[in-house]
Image: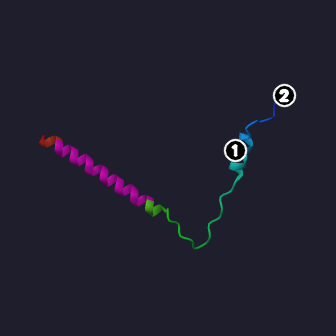
Amino acid sequence: MADNDYDPAGSTQMFRAFVDETPAPQAPGSVNTYGASGSRTGMIAAIAVGVLVVVGAVIWLAVK
């Protein structure tokens, strides 16, 4: 008779271990290279490039 609680891949146990992990505490005074200011700057740059592309497309269509 088969045991119904047996997980042959162990995926349930590995998932529970993953969920139960706590992130390592960050040392005080350490520099976060991927901070909010970097992502904010990237987002502003992406929006500016998008606006320039749209304005360029409108001007190109108006001249054509």
- 31 left or right of 2? left
In the rendered structure, which amino acid carries the disc numbered 1? Phe
Magenta stretch: helix, strand or loop mostly: helix
Name the residue nearer the viewer: 4 or 26: 4
Instruction: Provide the residue designation for mark 1.
Output: 15
Which residue lies most toward the right here? 1
Q: How crowded is the residue under tag 2: few (<14 C-alpha within 10 Å), some, or many (20+)?
A: few
- 10 left or right of 37? right
Image spot of residue 37 (x, y percent): 44, 63
Of the numbered discs in the image, which one, if any, rests on residue 2?
2
Rendered residue at 50%/65% (across/down): 33
Locate the N terminus and report the quarter of the image it occupies.
top right
Segment tinted magenta in the rendering:
39-60
Which residue lies most toward the left here? 63
Rounded to the nearest angstrom, the CA distance separating label 2 from label 1 is 23 Å
Rendered residue at 26%/46% (across/down): 54
